[in-house]
Image (cartoon, grey):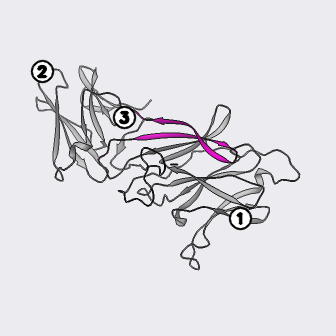
Amino acid sequence: MRVTWQMISVLAVAACEPRATSVSAVPRSASAPSRLATPPVLAPSESVARRAGPTDAKAPSASTIHYVVVEPTEEDPDGEKAGVFAERNGASFAVSASWANVRCLSVVVESDLDGDGQTDALISDGGCSSYTPPYYHLVMGTIGDHFVAQELGVGVDIRVEAWRGRQTAVLKSNNEGYNLERPQEVTRRFAFERGRAVVVDEQHAVEQKALANLRAEDFLGANPGQEKILSFDLDGDGKKDALAGTLWERWGRILWQIRFADGRVSDGGNDHACKRLGVLAEKTMGYRDLVCDFDTRITWNGRVYAFRPAK
């Protein structure tokens, strides 16, 4: 297998999608547009600290298993000997997996995730650049010599956190990229049971309802640089104002500005492009609130429309 979407900066955007049953799934073999992804970085507070396993004179403890990435070399340019290896008590075992790209593997988390006393690992696979979404895999520790990677999906972020008394992995995926599709975002929570990860919770981001919308899909068939306008009275003066946008084709997002009927202009969309720009029923200082993507609020601050800081 492969929730509120944050606004995308022109200087840094990120996105990707899961491969299996996700609403944004794309099989590796399928012909699909490139997706944007930011390789996840777990902050120290998000990382799971290693925990010593139960004392067992016959079985290795969790601390004796360590996962290492072996990259292609000049002697092995095709990476036939590359991959992820589990090291235990001086022995090295290759992790069995169909890696997307052996040149872009990394161990994201190394911890006893299921509490059986053996060190497990979450592996990032294929996130070679911000344009390449990484796959994530789970490797469960074992006292045997057969280590197997289970693919969890593609995501823009993965973290490990306690949930209902046990450790879980939370994988966030979306369909960000070179497309005019409506934004989709899925957050899946995996628990660790009987040596495997199983989905125990799944949340889909939901759009906040708007009175009117300007969407990326409205630019289907438009010429490069062509402008689309959504007319709506934003300031309550009885005159239609213009929510004007052009398509940022690389990411399928709208660069926008507000042109009031009295000639005033409020920029803002060049720094924060949107898949959807909607007009809400609520008002701030007498001006209609706007919404970007799912529920990112844009409000009037007395001078211009500005994004409301995330809570």
Residue 277: percent from left, percent from top: 27, 36
- Tell me the residue at 16%/48% (across/down): 226
Amino acid type of the residue tagged 1 in the rendering: Phe
Which residue in the protein does label 1 denote?
Answer: 93
Q: Which of marks 2 and 3 is nearer the N terminus?
A: 2
Q: Is residue 58 left or right of residue 192?
A: right
Mostly what secondary structure, the magenta segment? strand
Tally of numbered tags = 3
Part of the protein shown in magenta: 180-207
Magenta span has 206? yes
Calculate the distance from the C-alpha at mark 3 to the C-alpha at mark 1: 45 Å
| Frontmost residue, 96 versus 164 | 96
Magenta span has 68? no
Q: Which of marks 2 and 1 is nearer the N terminus?
A: 1
Q: Is residue 51 left or right of residue 201?
A: right
Residue 294: assigned label: 3
| Frontmost residue, 27 versus 226 | 27
- Badge 1: few (under 14), some or many (20 or more) residues near its Cα, within 10 Å? some
- Tell me the residue at 77%/47% (across/down): 117
Amino acid type of the residue tagged 2 in the rendering: Gly
Which residue in the protein does label 2 denote?
Answer: 238
Q: Is mark 2 on a helix, strand or loop?
A: loop
Q: Quadrant of residue 288?
A: top left
Tell me, yes or no, whether the two marked residues, 2 and 1, touch with CB atoms within 8 Å.
Answer: no
Q: Is residue 27 left or right of residue 78?
A: left
Residue 244 in the image: above or below residue 101: above
Q: Earlier in the sequence, mark 3 or mark 1?
A: 1
Q: Quadrant of residue 268?
A: top left
Q: In which quarter of the image is the C terminus?
A: top left
